[in-house]
Amino acid sequence: MTSFIDGKEGPAIVYPDAAFPVNRVRDEFRALDDGCLLCMINYDLPIMRKFLFPFLLHKDPTVA
């Protein structure tokens, strides 16, 4: 999926069947290294497109 953030191709999750405002949410992911993903929540609404809500997902080394 083409990123709203930088125009590059990458994985993203959208929620088209959810109720408003969740149906306008787009979660984009970028690998920082083998054990960490940078995740960015973006709202596809005119004034909100410029705001990102980042968080990190870390792989738990104790889980297979």
Image (cartoon, helix red, strand yellow):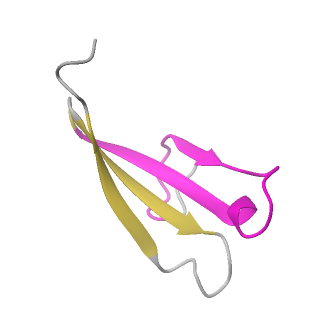
Between residue 37 and residue 2, name the one nearer to us: 37
- Percent position (x, y) of residue 47? 61, 88
Residue 55 image-quadrant placement: bottom left
Between residue 4 and residue 59, name the one nearer to us: 59
Between residue 31 and residue 9, name the one nearer to us: 31
- Percent position (x, y) of residue 16? 78, 52
- Percent position (x, y) of residue 14? 66, 49
Q: Is residue 40 above or below residue 13?
A: below
Q: Is residue 63 above or below residue 37?
A: above
Residue 52 image-quadrant placement: bottom left
Residue 48 image-quadrant placement: bottom right
x 59%, y 45%: residue: 13
x 82%, y 49%: residue: 17
Left or right: 54, with 50 as reference point: left
Which residues make up the magenta segment?
Answer: 5-32
x 42%, y 46%: residue: 29
Left or right: 39, with 36 as reference point: right
x 50%, y 45%: residue: 9
Residue 46, magenta (yes or no):
no
Residue occupying the far top of the picture? 64
Left or right: 29, with 3 as reference point: left
- Percent position (x, y) of residue 58? 24, 39
Q: Is residue 36 above or below residue 54?
A: above
Q: Is residue 63 above or below residue 51?
A: above
